[in-house]
């Protein structure tokens, strides 16, 4: 399976870089494509960490991906699944043979959520088919992890163990609640990208400093 992120931001934040790095670890660099980067983007604009991990990226949109990746199977109408929080059907394990590509945009992981899905649906009305991953906002790496569990591991959504809005406590006086749904690991802990907890702590400390 191929996973495509329509990168709809002008730059790469540290948060996004950690998420993308974790996605590459989870599914492999050959199975991830960043599309629709701003025109004029060069390798100098891509975090070196992601380039070193083999990130595939392009300024081409979904309709022109094969111009950038000539060995890529063409995207066919109705064979591309857009993960859409407003879709009326949840993604099912039995649909593994129905779709060739799974598309994610700046539509999961924003808080409050921005309606980026509508932009994608309007841009590719005949190409994409919408499917939902439950009713809670997810980070992009969580959304891809959940899709992989459903499509590749054939696991029903309701059987996946999640935690909603977990609280991360750094000491008896410091804690932060994250407004997203996360997959739990075998120990019952939320799965976060490597380095994310340290970033959350640093960001929370900076926010506190801004208030003081």
Image: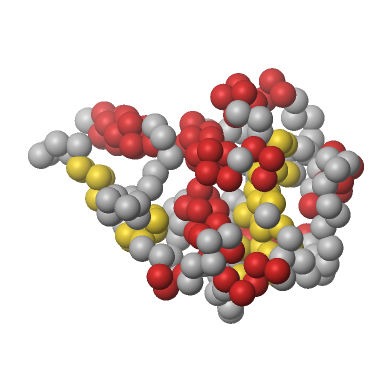
Q: Nearer the viewer, residue 210 or 34?
A: 34
Q: Name the foreground residue: 189 vs 181.
A: 189
Q: Is residue 85 visible?
A: no
Left or right, 40 with respect to 110, comes to right
Image quadrant occupied by the C terminus: top left
Which residue lies at the image location 88% right of the left edge and 41% below the top edge?
70
Name which quarter of the figure residue 93 lies in: bottom right
As displayed, is residue 27 above or below residue 87?
above
| Residue 129 position by quadrant | bottom right
Q: Residue at x 79, y 30 (%)?
A: 40
Number of numbered discs overlaid on the protein picture = 0
Residue 115 is situated, as x and y percent measured from the top left of the image, at 59, 61
Residue lying furthest front: 153
Q: Residue 73 location in percent, x, y?
A: 83, 52
**Quadrant of image for the N terminus:** bottom right
Q: Is residue 18 visible in this depiction of the protein?
A: yes
Residue drawn 61% across the image and 70% down it: 131
Query: From what the image shows, is residue 146 above or below residue 38?
Result: below
Q: Which percent across, then down, holds residue 35? A: 73, 44
Colouring: secondary structure
Q: Could you tell whether 41 is left or right of 158 in the image?
A: right
The residue depicted at 66 percent of the width and 33 percent of the height is 55
Q: Is residue 53 above or below residue 90?
A: above
| Residue 13 on image: x %, y % | 52, 33
Q: Farthest bottom residue?
A: 88
């Amino acid at each position: 399976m191929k996973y495509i992120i329509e990168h709809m931001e002008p730059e790469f934040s540290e948060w996004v870089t950690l998420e993308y790095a974790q996605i590459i670890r989870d599914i492999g660099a050959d199975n991830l494509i960043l599309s629709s980067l701003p025109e004029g983007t060069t390798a100098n604009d891509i975090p070196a960490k992601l380039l070193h991990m083999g990130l595939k990226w392009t300024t081409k949109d979904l309709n022109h991906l094969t111009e950038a990746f000539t060995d890529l199977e063409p995207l066919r109408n109705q064979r591309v699944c857009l993960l859409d929080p407003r879709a009326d059907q949840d993604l099912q394990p039995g649909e593994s043979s129905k779709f060739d590509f799974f598309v994610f945009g700046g539509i999961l992981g924003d808080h409050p959520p921005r309606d980026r899905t509508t932009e994608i649906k309007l841009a590719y009305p005949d190409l994409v088919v919408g499917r939902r991953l439950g009713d809670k906002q997810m980070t992009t790496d969580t959304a891809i992890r959940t899709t992989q569990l459903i499509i590749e591991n054939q696991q029903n959504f309701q059987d996946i163990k999640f935690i909603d809005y977990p609280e991360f406590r750094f000491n008896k006086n410091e804690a932060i609640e994250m407004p997203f749904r996360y997959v739990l690991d075998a120990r019952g802990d939320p799965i976060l990208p490597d380095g994310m907890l340290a970033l959350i702590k640093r960001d929370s400390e900076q926010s506190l400093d801004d208030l003081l």
